[in-house]
Image: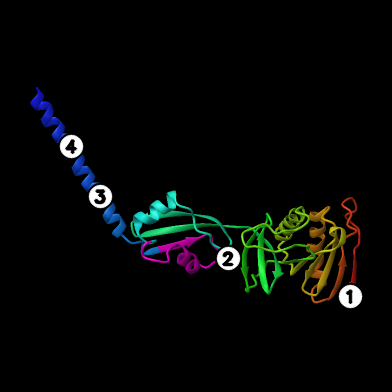
Amino acid sequence: MAGKKGKGKKRIKRVLLLLAAVLALLAAAGFLIRIREVTVTGNNRCTSEEITEILFPTAKERSLIYCYLNDRFGEHKKIPYVEDYDLEFQSPTSVEVIVYEKSIVGYLRYMSSYMYFDKDGVVVDSTNEKLEGVPEVTGLEFGHIALYAPLPVKDSQVFDEVLSLTQALYDYEIEADEIRFGSRNQITLKIGEIDVELGTIDDIGGKISVLHDTLPVLEGQAGTLYLDSYDEANTSMMYTFKKK
């Protein structure tokens, strides 16, 4: 009986060693397999080529096993304008990068650069390139600006106002060139050659609705449209436009 037990233990040991050897070979083969095809989806601000270069700069990052383990257990790399990303392995040699972009609501001019920030007031990129469709925000008081850190403004509530305003502009497909904050948080939009006085953020949805209906009438003109007197209870109210 003792002999049979000894043989059984040796057999199990050989099987375990064989399995370990097979796993080692598979792991080695996995490290040798290279990702050759990268597809990027969900990106608008960064090009697919830029994202691919950031995530797969060398042969090591293109190793199948390294890429898989690093994605599951490592820290994701920082990509401008990107909140996070997922890797979906389509085959041993191809992967899809699914990008989740940050919501960029505006930019500030700072030391000859455009400092873009998201809805939380965090600076997500510093560049000399101006992005289309993103308004410049002026009139804010701030100190030293650092990348990936919140803008050091005195009144953080202003970002809630920026978000509410930009969301209303997005809903009505209006592109503003500038959002200017004056004293007592009075807001002025600049759209081409037209300045729009909005007053405070109160009733911003109604004000932007009126702006949407009025802009086609003012096409080609220059001047100031006053919507700061908007009254939600008086939908037939006329608004003043002063030409330059």
Horizontal side, residue 110 vs residue 67: left or right: right
Q: Which residue is mark 3?
A: 24
* Number of other residues with Cα within 10 Å of mark 2, as a class: few under 14, some 14 to 19, many 20 or more: some
Q: Which mark is residue 66?
A: none
Residue 108 position, x and y percent, is 71, 67
| Residue type pointed to by label 1 | Lys
Three-letter code, disc 4: Lys
Percent x, y of residue 45: 58, 65
Q: Name the N-terminal-most of marks 4 and 1.
A: 4
> Which stretch is magenta?
38-60
Q: Residue at x 22, y 47 (%)?
A: 22
Element under label 2?
Answer: loop
Give the CA distance from mark 2 to mark 1: 37 Å
Labels 3 & 2 near each other (Cβ < 8 A): no
Q: Counting other residues with Cα less than 10 Å from the Cα at mark 1, is it few (<14), some (14-19), or many (20 or more)?
A: few
The residue that label 4 is drawn on is 13
Query: Residue beneath label 1, please?
Result: 243
Magenta span contains residue 50: yes
Residue drawn at the location 80% of the way across and 77% of the way down: 220
Task: Tell me which amino acid carries mark 2.
Answer: Arg
Q: Amino acid at mark 3?
A: Ala
Q: Position of residue 131 (x, y in %)?
A: 64, 70
Q: Which residue is mark 2?
A: 45
Q: Residue at x 87, y 58 (%)?
A: 184
Q: Is residue 86 visible?
A: yes
Locate residue 210, reporting x and y percent. 82, 60
